[in-house]
Image: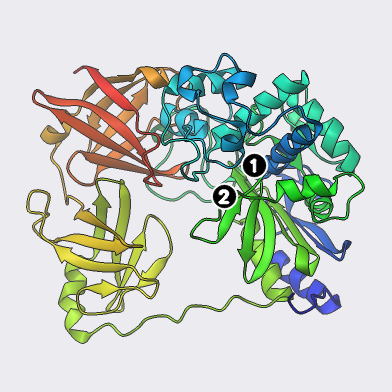
């Protein structure tokens, strides 16, 4: 057990001062609450709940908790399992008999622990197809999209891969087993008995959404094509997200930081509502990953900063949230924000720094050799792995090399070739002549015993070459068609379904037949065009994580 944790007046003052410094009184805000030994020594709200109506954020304002709802969904499954109504070995098609045959081997446990191989509906619908959060698909349309996907990304139970479709289906299964609306069951069995009086599930279409805190993003989130109103310059200010979705299970919880503390306290126990067997069950993960974490019943479990912990974080357009519990310290931290530029987990980490002590920082590497100066200038730029669609950037700052892999943090590089980071990443030059830019070599990157070839970005592409990609492309599995047209230095995709405008974006070239689009939401998406003897035959969408589970082919049907 760690040293005792205290929240004295000085700590209270410092946390309050830090939060006030992060959030101006007239901007969207945050709720922060800390529980220690089942007491709540710190709970406060900062900023505004709604800028248009000049409503301040209070401790009772309800914010969207994003994926934190998975804790409730997993807990509901544990309760039904305890009741004997839903054994986790139950096959998916035994409780959802209309689910397609491609899910024949799926069991409840595969959904619970993110080991199903299902395609992620949030990517399929919001990122690939272009549904907009202000006019979202219905729950039935979400279900139809998962059914229509037609295949799994991997064999169920063979590995972990976080996927919102799992918990959406669990909510639907709970409705089937209990013959009640998911939100009504959660309220009856969890929210009301635990005393989470300020929490609600958003699957009731009669709910008045205007009474809740508004979420804010840093770009105009309007119900129309992004390229019609976004410029290359960054936007300043706050724009309301205006979420209107009612599909739940993977998201769909409006709550407060204080209510999340109540949930955490009951999970840590003792609890007069949650039995010891249920608490033990929901904290049990079937496998621990290489990063030291496992996924139990809607909960991440493992060790964080040397302390045993469980919890979950969430992010949805305009909101971030986290609930983290450290049972050995009797410490729980909950934070919600209604702005995406201040993350709930950054606030949580500050609290941990103040109460437990800061995490030891890695020593920066500054031993780059003088003779690398020429190489530094040559290597700097963007690269892409055409297999995983993962991007890599080499940067030079004050003559020193840094590398950013897949949008992660920048790590310093040392050595004179091969170069390496303190974390074990190693980079050396390759010569893939068929894909090589004349100014820069390709790179062989060794990361966790895996070697990948990263190809340098094309410096430019002429308009005639872009015109070769033009046409109409369709995907039956997504029931979606896009028109591709060449614009100045890029390709513009336009969804033929006017209900789905949010992914109508401009894509710029990276390497041969690969194009990407940087956009605040979903940050990065990529297209890989496919060649046949007659020319371009189609493309596949590649999301930023490079896992290829959303690889659906769009076939070219006309020029």
317 shown above or below 26: above
Point out the tag, 1 or 2, that comes first from the N-terminus.
1
Residue 309: image quadrant is bottom right
Residue 259 seen in the current view? no
Whole-percent x, y for residue 531 in the image: 15, 30
Decide which of 414, 491 is in the foreground and name it.
414
Element marked by disc 1: helix
Q: Which residue sits furthest right?
A: 272
In the visual, does 73 lie left or right of 92? right
Q: Quadrant of the N terminus?
A: bottom right
Q: Is residue 177 left or right of residue 269?
A: left
Please determine whether, in this image, residue 269 is positioned above or below residue 315. below
In-front residue for pair 528/520: 528
The crowding category of the residue bearing disc 1, from other C-alpha atoms within 10 Å (few below 14, some 14 to 19, many at least 20), is many
Mark number for residue 237?
2
Q: CA distance from mark 1 to mark 2?
A: 23 Å
Where residue 286 appears, as percent x and y from the top left, is 59, 48
Answer yes or no: is residue 439 visible.
Answer: yes
Q: Position of residue 457 (x, y in %)?
A: 21, 52
Q: What residue is shown at x 10% (from left), y 59% (from top)?
A: 431
Answer above or below: position of 40 versus 491.
below
Q: For residue 66, which numbered disc appears in the image? A: 1
């Amino acid at each position: 057990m760690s040293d005792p944790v205290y929240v004295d007046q000085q700590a209270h003052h410092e946390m309050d001062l830090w939060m006030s410094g992060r959030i101006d009184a007239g901007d969207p805000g945050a709720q922060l609450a800390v529980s220690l030994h089942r007491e709540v020594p710190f709970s406060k709200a900062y900023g505004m709940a709604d800028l248009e109506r000049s409503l301040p954020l209070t401790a009772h304002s309800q914010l969207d908790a994003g994926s934190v709802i998975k804790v409730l969904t997993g807990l509901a499954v544990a309760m039904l399992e305890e009741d004997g109504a839903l054994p986790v070995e139950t096959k998916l098609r035994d409780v959802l008999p209309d689910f397609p045959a491609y899910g024949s081997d799926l069991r409840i446990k595969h959904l619970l622990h993110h080991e199903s191989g299902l395609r992620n509906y949030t990517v399929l619908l919001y990122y690939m197809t272009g549904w907009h959060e202000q006019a979202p698909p219905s729950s039935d349309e979400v279900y139809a999209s998962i059914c229509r996907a037609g295949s799994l990304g991997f064999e169920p139970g063979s590995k972990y891969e976080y996927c919102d479709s799992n918990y959406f289906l669990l909510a639907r299964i709970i409705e089937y087993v209990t013959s009640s609306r998911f939100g009504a069951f959660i309220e009856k069995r969890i929210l009301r008995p635990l005393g989470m009086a300020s929490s609600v599930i958003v699957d009731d279409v009669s709910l008045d959404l205007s009474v809740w805190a508004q979420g804010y993003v840093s770009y105009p989130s309007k119900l129309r094509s992004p390229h019609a109103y976004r410029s290359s310059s960054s936007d300043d200010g706050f724009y309301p997200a205006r979420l209107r979705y009612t599909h739940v299970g993977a998201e769909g919880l409006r709550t407060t930081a204080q209510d999340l503390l109540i949930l955490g306290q009951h999970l840590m126990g003792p609890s007069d509502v949650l039995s010891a067997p249920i608490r033990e069950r929901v904290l049990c993960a079937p496998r621990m990953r290489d990063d030291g974490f496992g996924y139990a019943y809607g909960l991440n479990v493992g060790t964080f900063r040397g302390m045993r912990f469980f919890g979950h974080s969430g992010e949805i357009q305009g909101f971030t949230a986290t609930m983290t519990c450290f049972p050995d310290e009797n410490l729980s931290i909950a934070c919600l924000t209604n702005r995406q530029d201040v993350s709930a987990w950054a606030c949580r980490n500050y609290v941990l720094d103040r109460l437990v002590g800061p995490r030891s920082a890695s020593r920066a590497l500054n031993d780059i050799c003088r003779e690398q100066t020429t190489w530094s200038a040559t290597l700097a730029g963007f690269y892409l792995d055409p297999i995983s669609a993962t991007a890599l950037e080499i940067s030079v700052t004050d003559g020193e090399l840094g590398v950013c892999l897949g949008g992660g943090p920048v790590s310093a590089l040392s050595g004179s070739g091969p170069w390496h980071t303190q974390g074990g990443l190693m980079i050396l030059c390759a010569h893939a002549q068929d894909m090589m830019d004349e100014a820069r070599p390709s790179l062989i990157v060794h990361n966790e015993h895996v070697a990948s070839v990263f190809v340098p970005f094309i410096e430019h592409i002429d308009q005639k070459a872009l015109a070769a990609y033009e046409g109409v492309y369709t995907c039956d599995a997504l029931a979606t068609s896009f028109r591709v047209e060449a614009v100045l230095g890029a390709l513009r995709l336009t969804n033929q379904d006017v209900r789905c405008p949010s992914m109508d974006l401009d894509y710029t070239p990276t390497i041969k037949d690969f194009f990407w689009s940087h956009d605040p939401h979903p940050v990065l998406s990529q297209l890989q065009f496919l060649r046949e003897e007659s020319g371009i035959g189609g493309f596949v969408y590649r999301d930023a994580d490079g896992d290829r589970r959303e690889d659906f082919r769009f076939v070219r049907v006309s020029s």
